[in-house]
Image: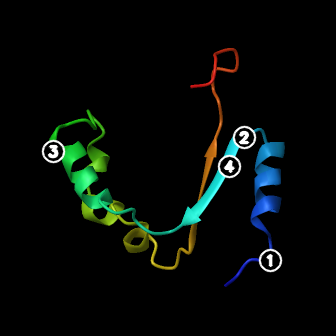
Amino acid sequence: MRSSISKPAIAARAREAGFDAVGFARAMAPIGASEGLSNYLRHGYHGDMAWMETGAARRADPNVLWPEAKSVMAMRWKICRGASAA
């Protein structure tokens, strides 16, 4: 199913809802994503977030997790409004 809503329209709605930034990308794993995730987990950088290890191979690639996905949308909401942007 293809949506008739454009990316600029989605971004505008997200900004109206209070999000500071909106981005879109193809739903595909970047080169090295699987190895990077494995390394991250192996070093224990995920702390007590055990859920990150569960199904790590599935999480390394959005097409494995959601085969029907074509795009990924990321939004940022700055929590500390008084702090300078990083």
Q: Amino acid at mark 4?
A: Val
Image coordinates of residue 73 in percent, x first then y, are 61, 58
The residue under the point 64% across, 18% down is 84
Q: Amino acid at mark 3?
A: Arg
Of pointers 3 and 1, the one earlier in the residue sequence: 1
Q: CA distance from mark 4 to mark 1?
A: 18 Å
Q: Is residue 55 visible?
A: no
Q: Hey, which residue is sitting farthest bottom in the picture?
A: 1
Q: Which residue is mark 3?
A: 42
Label 2 element class: loop
Q: Which residue is mark 2?
A: 19
The residue under the point 42% across, 73% down is 63
Depth check: 58 or 83 in front?
83
Q: CA distance from mark 3 to mark 1?
A: 42 Å
Q: Which residue is mark 4?
A: 22
Of pointers 2 and 1, the one earlier in the residue sequence: 1
Of pointers 3 and 4, the one earlier in the residue sequence: 4
Left or right: residue 71 compared with residue 48: right
Q: Amino acid at mark 2?
A: Phe
Image coordinates of residue 23 in percent, x first then y, are 64, 53
Q: Is the residue under label 1 in contact with that under label 2 (CB below 8 Å)?
A: no
Q: CA distance from mark 4 to mark 2?
A: 7 Å
Depth check: 22 or 13 in front?
22
Q: CA distance from mark 2 to mark 3?
A: 33 Å
The residue under the point 35% across, 60% down is 59
Label 3 element class: helix
